[in-house]
Image (cartoon, grey):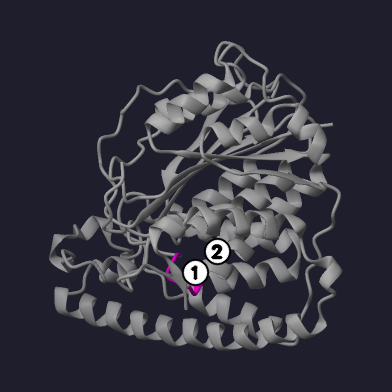
Amino acid sequence: MKTKRLIFSGLLLAFTVSIYSCEFKKERNSTKSLLAEVLPENDKEIEPKKNTVQIALLLDTSNSMDGLINQAKAQLWDVVNKFTHAKCGDDSRPDLQIALYQYGNDNLSYREGYVQQVLDFTGDLDEISEKLFSLTTNGGEEFCGTVIHKSLRQLNWAKNPDNLKMIFIAGNEPFTQGETHYKDAASNAKEKDVIVNTIFCGNYEQGIHGKWKEGALLAGGDYMAIDHNREIVHINTPYDDAIIDYNTKLNDTYISYGSLGSLKKEKQAAQDDNAAELQEAVVVKRAVSKSSRLYNNKDWDLVDASNEEDFSVGSVDKEDLPKELRNKSPEEIETYISEKKQERAKIQEKIQELNKKREKYIVENQDENKSGELENAMINAIKKQAEEKNYRWD
């Protein structure tokens, strides 16, 4: 039985924990029918800036497990919210890049080993959410060594040794399948200073027998096994309606620009709708994420873009502005942006204040037995691996 989707929720948790790895001065060495795209090695040569964490999620999407898929979709926002306050030793905040692969799906190309790069490294949370919602499951062959190898070859892994680079691969078939041997993939990962963590969906001892633990240890990572049938419980609180209302107001502070601005703004609304289709509580969690530093849309939103040191209103072509701003002077546009920025800051502050009350309510009303064992396992693993990166939580 292929139970990969819950795994994604754990992986998502894992990636956010890793958000917090930091630069540390220390000597040390989609749609379901899409075909896998073969990307050339080092196709992109843009090196991420310092204090960037890169997480590649490799998800087995064989067979149908809709309930677990929904858990994965919902828990993305839990993860972001829980770890958005991480700091490096110098008090700076690390950036996050996420990449997504799927493997083991019959709809993928046989020639590519049933592997597809769904998403290249990005910090766009809406994009990550959209790709997650686009995933579907279908039975197939699961080649762990192959998908690890391809992610190492195709992605633009940072060369800065101070950056934390991690792979999380999830599945429930033997780790040994496929033409690319898992030992070779692990060796390649170590050469690139990429940690490989494995999550087996099923019995802990069964995963060990299937070489999932060995695969992790060879690449400096951790092995985890989860109970994929464990239900994730969302607790509704008296503060949810107010947060959802502020979320609607928050969307009105975004000023789209550029060739993709309007499409990105539509995507923002679409991911709100996707969250709403799951549960009201998921809309709340997403709203809290949108009020955090990790939700940054400088590539299409003038408010976020204006926070960049090299940003200038005069550098934006009139045709790239929304219609209501095209006939305004640069001074008038700057005033408009400033007003929206202040409005957004107030709304985000309100959401954060309400969320503190919401979190307190959840702690007081949550059954300890309902907490996810996957969450605890992932957090513990990432914290252990990130000790050398000198990060902390405030």
Judge whether 17 appears above or below 337 on screen: above
Residue behind mark 1: 84
Q: What is the x, y in percent for residue 365?
A: 82, 82
- Residue 301 located left or right of residue 287: left
The location of residue 372, given as percent across then percent down, is 76, 60
Q: Which mark is residue 242?
A: none
Q: Which amino acid does label 1 sit on?
A: Thr
Q: Quadrant of residue 258?
A: bottom left
Q: Judge left or right: residue 320 versus residue 57.
A: left
Contact flag, marks 2 and 1 (Cβ < 8 Å):
yes
Which residue lies at the image location 56% right of the left edge and 88% below the top edge? 353
Above or below for 252 versus 305: below
What type of secondary structure mainly makes up the magenta span?
A: loop
Q: Is residue 286 magenta?
A: no
Magenta residues, start to end? 290-294
SS of the residue under disc 1 = loop
